[in-house]
Image: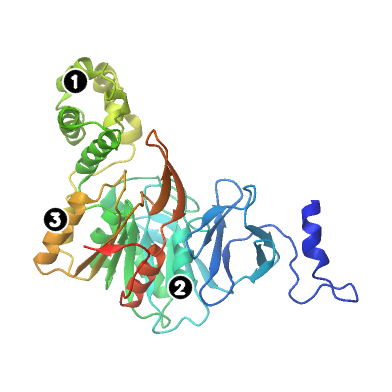
Amino acid sequence: MTSSFLWPFLAVSLTATGAPAPDAFSPAPCETGIFRQDQKGFVAITKGGKGYSYTFSDGTVGNTQDAGAPVACGKGAVLVSGKERWPKVALAESNTRFESNGVMLAGRLMEAPGAGKDTPLVVYAHGSEGSGWIDRARDPYQMVGRGVSVFVYDKRGTGLSEGEYTQNFPRLADDLVAASREAKRLAQGRYGRFGLMGVSQGGWIAPLAQARAKAEFLGIGYGLVLDITEQDAAQVVKELRDRGYGDDVIAKARTMTDITARLVKSGYKDGLDDLSGVQQRFGKEPWFALIKGGYTGVFLGMPVDALRKNGIPQFDKLDIDWSLDPLQVLSQVTVPQLWALAEDDRQAPPAVTVERLTALRSQGQAISVYLFPQADHGMRSYDQASDGTRKPTIITPGFYDLMADWAKGGVHGTYGRAYRK
């Protein structure tokens, strides 16, 4: 790389003899890992859609290829704000392959220097993304940077793992149990508390795996205690509310989500004529095209004859188990749980989840709930335009600190602007 903007970095790092100083910054291709300024401040570099992404411990995120990016990659270090050299942390990383129901999955144990018998160990349950997590997911690095050992793996059908991508939660829970066994094997003698963390869709999967994985705690980020059809309905309502529509339109939308719920649960047999009816009745109203939800928008845009003949291949190949009742699953969990929810989440509206978690807590379950204001799905703060569209900004402050403290055995103090429910 020979761009002229590099020369100032090199010029200030030469000794009188012309040799590089011991702490010289040498530009080099990016590599994944944690780069630390001090005991609190660090930045994690992960592979991104283009180039490499960065996530600072305060939640600042971006891509190293963005104009004006505050991070430049170097040999064994990064340069922050054009002046501060942050060296790479020597993590202990153990790559592995392990089997789950005949499928070979790829995983990695990541441990910070000094990990020992009192260090917590967590395994993550993924969200619904179709990409692998090894070298790509920011959450594991944020936990390791805070002193928590993490086992991360690529879901079946993604990254380095074999098999076919699926959204069959019981099958994904089996994979999480297998990952937990492998994590404990690799970290034997160097961990204390063991738990599962799930983000987004992982909030359905981690509770399913908890007992078999022998997890001592659960930590859930922006998950739901609703089934898939309830999530879809809640998402549709929020979409319309956010656009200013009132109860009359909401009532019509609920009729539609009731129909599409019947369709998915019956294998597209129950509700086809009703779907055709609402398409004809409401199809020209201005709010109709705004409906997305998790799947209802797809149904509303399909000719019923095509649905009757072909189904919806992109849904069918996911092998979704529509019968899963997350409230029933959670009622069987006996270990402490933390739920960190985004108050303005459009994909996973939290209101019903808070109600159900509060009810379970009143029945004696150890459940802590934190709500983060002005945060959307992914725990991203955002700027909102006049038309309601949102531009994600930082990871809301306090989220990663909360999750790490929970893994270590106790939450205390304040976490950004979060409040307890």
State the residue at coordinates (61%, 49%). 51
Identify the residue under disc 3: 328
Amino acid identity at mark 2: Arg
Question: Counting residues from the N terminus, which is met first, the one under dot 2 or under dot 3?
Answer: 2
Q: Which of 330 and 85 is in front in this view?
A: 85
| As drawn, 164 above or below 30 | above
Q: Can residue 156 be seen in this view?
A: no
Amino acid identity at mark 1: Val
Q: Position of residue 34 (x, y in %)?
A: 56, 67
Q: Where is residue 94 in the image (x, y as percent from the top left)?
A: 51, 70
Closer mark to the observer between disc 3 and disc 1:
1
Amino acid identity at mark 3: Gln
Which corner quadrant holds the C terminus?
bottom left
The answer to whether mark 2 and mark 3 are in CB contact below 8 A is: no
Horizontal side of 173 relative to 324 (left or right) equals right
Q: How far apart are marks 1 and 2 (CA)?
A: 52 Å
Tell which residue pokes out farthest to the right in this image. 17
Question: Counting residues from the N terminus, which is met first, the one under dot 3 or under dot 1?
Answer: 1
Identify the residue under disc 1: 278
Identify the residue under disc 2: 146
Horizontal side of 80 relative to 259 (left or right) equals right
| As drawn, 127 above or below 421 | above
Q: Where is residue 4 in the image (x, y as percent from the top left)?
A: 81, 52
State the residue at coordinates (10%, 65%). 362
Specify few, some or many for label 1: CA neighbours under 10 Å numbering under 14, 14-19, or 20 or more.
Answer: some
